[in-house]
Image (cartoon, rainbow, N blue to C red):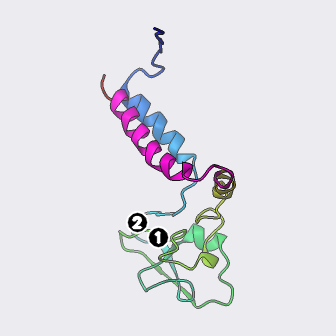
């Protein structure tokens, strides 16, 4: 039998979880979900939104093209979040370049997945969350 010895580079489970969160924040999200705080600028594009509750944060609006669209803005009360990148809430033509299926980083992953054998992507989609859960449980077992 072969035994593998590993060393834990983290001094605590909290340090390991913080490192995981940092790594996760480096991966672009498909949906912005920026949480609105009181007085944030919230953009409405009646041309792109699916219904009147669908909105964009100021950063996503500035980075997207809504020229010629029916737009307005208001100052938020606390609550709600940006819908940029969510095709159920927003026309993909109105997404900023950082969110949605064609966002930077997403296209490369889609192209790489296209070359894989049939059935691999769904299995990996199930396996990766299970591995993440196992990893967190192992790290937290201090």
Image quadrant of residue 99?
Answer: bottom right
Question: Disc 2 designates what residue?
Answer: 37
Q: Is residue 53 magenta?
A: no
Q: Nearer the viewer, residue 5 or 16?
A: 5
**Could you say where residue 40 lies in the image, as x and y percent from the top left?**
46, 70
The number of discs equals 2
Image quadrant of residue 136?
Answer: top left
Q: Nearer the viewer, residue 56 or 107?
A: 107
Q: CA distance from mark 2 to mark 1?
A: 6 Å
Q: Nearer the viewer, residue 39 or 65?
A: 65
- Please, is residue 72 above or below residue 38 in the view? below
Q: Are marks 2 and 1 in contact (CB under 8 Å)?
A: yes
- Please, is residue 132 above or below residue 48 in the view? above
Q: Which mark is residue 40?
A: 1
Crowding at mark 2 (Cα within 10 Å: few <14, some 14-19, many 20+): some
Q: Residue at x 56, y 84 (%)?
A: 48
**Could you say where residue 39 lies in the image, as x and y percent from the top left?**
43, 72
Which residues are the magenta region?
A: 113-139
- Please, is residue 134 above or below residue 85 in the view? above
What secondary structure is marked by label 2?
A: loop
Q: Quadrant of the N terminus?
A: top left
Q: Nearer the viewer, residue 10 or 135?
A: 135
Q: Which mark is residue 84?
A: none
**Could you say where residue 90 lies in the image, as x and y percent from the top left?**
52, 78
Image quadrant of residue 11?
Answer: top left
Q: Main secondary structure of the magenta part?
A: helix
């Amino acid at each position: 039998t072969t035994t593998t010895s590993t060393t834990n580079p983290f001094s605590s489970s909290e340090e390991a979880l913080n490192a995981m969160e940092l790594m996760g924040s480096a991966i672009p999200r498909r949906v912005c979900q920026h949480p609105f705080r009181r007085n944030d600028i919230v953009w409405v594009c009646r041309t792109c939104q699916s219904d009147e509750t669908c909105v964009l944060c100021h950063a996503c609006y500035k980075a997207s093209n809504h020229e010629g669209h029916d737009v307005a803005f208001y100052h938020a009360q606390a609550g709600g979040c940006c819908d940029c990148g969510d095709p159920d809430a927003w026309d993909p033509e109105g997404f900023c370049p950082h969110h949605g299926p064609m966002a930077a980083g997403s296209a490369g992953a889609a192209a790489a997945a296209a070359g894989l054998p049939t059935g691999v992507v769904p299995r990996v989609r199930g396996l990766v969350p299970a591995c993440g859960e196992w990893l967190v449980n192992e790290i937290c077992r201090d």
